[in-house]
Amino acid sequence: MQAIWNGTVIAEAHKNDLIYIEGNWYFPPASLQRELLSESPTPYTCPWKGKCQYYTVEVDGQTNVDAAWSYPEPLPTAIERVHKDFSGYVAFWRGVEVAE
């Protein structure tokens, strides 16, 4: 699967390596083009997953603020609920296309 924005692949991994949570595909850290992501100061804490880290995506001089997010250290109960450790996995929205 791929996450694509502005014609550029931001993340790519086999579907079996992704984790599906609440309607979003989370890509493993190793699948990301890290140079296209920068940490955002936007704060958010999910009641059941824990503290979230948003990322701004930048491609060819264009930015997509908070278009990606991750839970660097999800709550232990969240990992139990999902049945997989999704620490550092990244999901996308705001115009980022996720497709097979």
Image: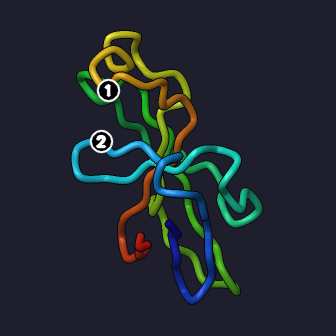
Most extreme residue toward the right, as rendered? 35
The residue labelled by disc 2 is 21
User: Does label 1 or label 2 sit earlier along the sequence?
Assistant: 2
Relative height, residue 1 to residue 23 (above, below)? below
Location of residue 81 (image quadrant): top left
- State left or right for residue 69 relative to residue 33: left
The residue labelled by disc 1 is 82
Most extreme residue toward the top, as rendered? 76
Gap between marks 1 and 2 measured at Cα: 7 Å
Q: Amino acid at mark 1?
A: Val
Q: Quadrant of the C terminus?
A: bottom left
- Residue at image point 50% right, 39% down: 53
Relative height, residue 40 to residue 6 (above, below)? above
Relative height, residue 56 to residue 89 (above, below)? below
**Label 1 packing within 10 angstroms: few (<14), some (14-19), many (20+):** some
Horizontal and vertical percent for residue 65?
48, 65
Question: How many circles with numbers are drawn on the protein?
Answer: 2
- Residue at image point 38% right, 53% down: 25
Q: Could you say whether the residue bearing mark 1 is in a helix, strand or loop?
A: helix
**Label 2 packing within 10 angstroms: few (<14), some (14-19), many (20+):** few
- State left or right for residue 98 relative to residue 31: left
Q: Amino acid at mark 2?
A: Ile
Horizontal and vertical percent for residue 61?
69, 84
**94 or 83: which is nearer to us?**
83
Q: Are marks 1 and 2 in contact (CB under 8 Å)?
A: yes
- Residue at image point 34% right, 29% down: 45
Residue 68's disc is none
Horizontal and vertical percent for residue 30?
70, 47
Q: Could you say whether the residue bearing mark 2 is in a helix, strand or loop?
A: strand
